[in-house]
Image (cartoon, coloured by chain):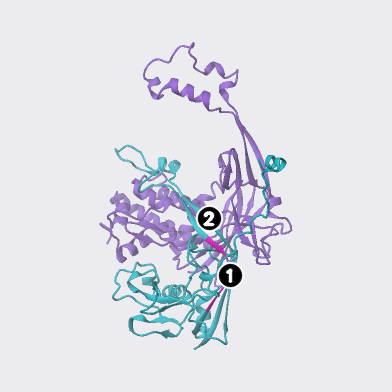
Chain colours: A purple, B cyan
Amino acid sequence: MNGRIETVFTLLSPLSHIGESIGPNSHLATQEMLDANGNPIEVFAYSGNALRGMWRDTGAEYMLKKLGGNMALQIPLELFYLFFSGGAIGGDQSIDIDQARRIREQIPHLSIFGGGVGNMLLPGKLSVGEALPVCQELAHIVPEHVPGNRELSARQMTTEISYSRKDDAKDDLLRPFLQTDQSPMIEGGQMSLLADPDEKKKEKKEKPQQMRYTMEVFCRGAVLWQETFFRDLSEIELGAFVAAIVKWAENPCIGGQGRIGMGRVKAEMVLITDGERGKFISVGEKCLLSEEARGVKAHYDNFLERYTAYLEENRSGLTHAISGEVAK
Amino acid sequence: MKPLKITAYMQTGKIATTDLYLPLDSIMASIWMHKNRPDLAYAPIIDYENMVDAELPLEKRGEGDDWYWACSFACGEPKKEEILHWHKRFDFDLGTQYVDFEKRRGRVDVKSGHYKNYRMPLVTYLIPKLEWYAIGDLKQVEALVNEITHIGKKRSQGLGRVQRWTVEEWPEDLSFLRAIPDPNGDMEMGIRPPYWLSWQWKLARLSDDGRLACNYRIDAPPHPNVQHDYDDEEQWEGDL
């Protein structure tokens, strides 16, 4: 199956996606692009690599939770690195064509996101594009049907938010909890957990904890438009992608500073195959799947269930699937 | 087969490439493989002797093992060069949940070795459109290029997105704007897909025609035309 998925993200909270930091201030990542007249302009864009990495993580989590029967299945470090970060090329392991084919069949997650296995690069089947803001500068690129304000410049959609980091050691109410030379030392082995308390104190004096820092963010309410292309996907592989989105929809955030509630989004995904458009997934308060998305996800779930049964008999089945020792 | 001009209109104009050669016959060959030999499309090339060549709707030129497709390298005028960075990092939060260290110490070195974190520079160019000149069958070439959605490196991250293609007959044959095998050539180059395969690199010559994107020189931004007179005390202080 060839086609693409168009996603419209609406920011429900400010988005942080740092490109450059100067001292305590960070600025949004921008890229040079061409305006309607073909002249270079600098516009904010949310990186396709960031989206891809995020969906790769949630896809691997979904797979390991399913295979572990709702407990997280723990795997060797090298496999973890392959599933979550794409692995790296190197090592003694030599991969042949048949082995590459088997890996694709047995681990659809790896087949769609790709990775470095042994001495070979297993190409993925997805092209996850950057999310472009609907704004004046890119109005000629973003399709007409996408909502958003096309008359406002992307620069006008950014704002700066400042935060303070307080030094609690200077708080009179908290100070009684701070150990001083006069206060009694904690006895026993607990003190040995600190490398050198005296040195630490000196360091503290030298490095002030209190500071004010500022982040440039993309404003709440802004709309981003994004395309994900896929090629030669089987139903199970499309199901693996849907599963990654379903897992991501449990906490639908993009960008950094999620710990302080940034980057929360709602997303509308449309599937386009053979020129036909159809609603695919809607991520908001709930994650709503179209009939087609539900169908392919069910295929993937069935596949994972069968694989779970196989793993119960062969505890190191995943490792062997990669190394090619068994499962021929 | 007739002389053709093939144009790719880029979406944001961003293409990741270091040399700007971007041979279209190579991209068409990849699409041909996906359509006609899907069993080989994702497989590594191991058996060089029995390698399958794509059957492209282009004229074949050259003799013996020096054959190549009559299709130029990319022509166009890059507007700007920009270095982007992509990042790869080991996720410790997820690692604590999913890694089974067995009885070993759970330590991962991300500063060097297999699990090293990366901040990799990526050379990109801004180009509104790219043009290629070929001798081929218009309808079949059109069918193949319309399936190409991205050009260049890092297509997986959405770079090199093509908005639309046009293929038209062209009065002139400019397909020579490419690497032509020549025993007196001044460098070894790939002459047919896959271009990266050193096994089929040949001595070749590449035209220095200014229409080729790889020969285009982007004007450096003008230097600020400020005369510094450091005998002038006020300007000295201002500059400080």
Q: Is residue A221 above or below residue B160?
A: above
Mark 2, secondary structure of its residue:
strand
Range drawn in magenta: B124-132
Amino acid on which disc 1 is placed: Glu
Q: Is residue A6 above or below residue B28?
A: above
Query: Which chain is home to disc 2?
Result: B
Residue A320 lies in what quarter of the image?
bottom left
Farthest residue toward the left? Answer: A325
Magenta segment includes A293: no
Amino acid on which disc 2 is placed: Leu
Q: Where residue A209 sits: x, y (%)?
A: 56, 28
- Looking at the image, which is closer to me, B44 or B76? B76
Mark 2 vs mark 1: tell me if same chain.
yes
Q: Is residue A70 above or below residue B38?
A: above
Residue B219 lies in what quarter of the image?
bottom right
Q: Residue at x 35, y 79 (%)?
A: B183
Residue indicated by mark 2: B84
Task: Let me know if residue B191 appears in the view.
Answer: no
- Looking at the image, which is closer to me, B151 or A98? B151
Q: Is residue B173 above or below residue A199?
A: below
Magenta segment includes B130: yes
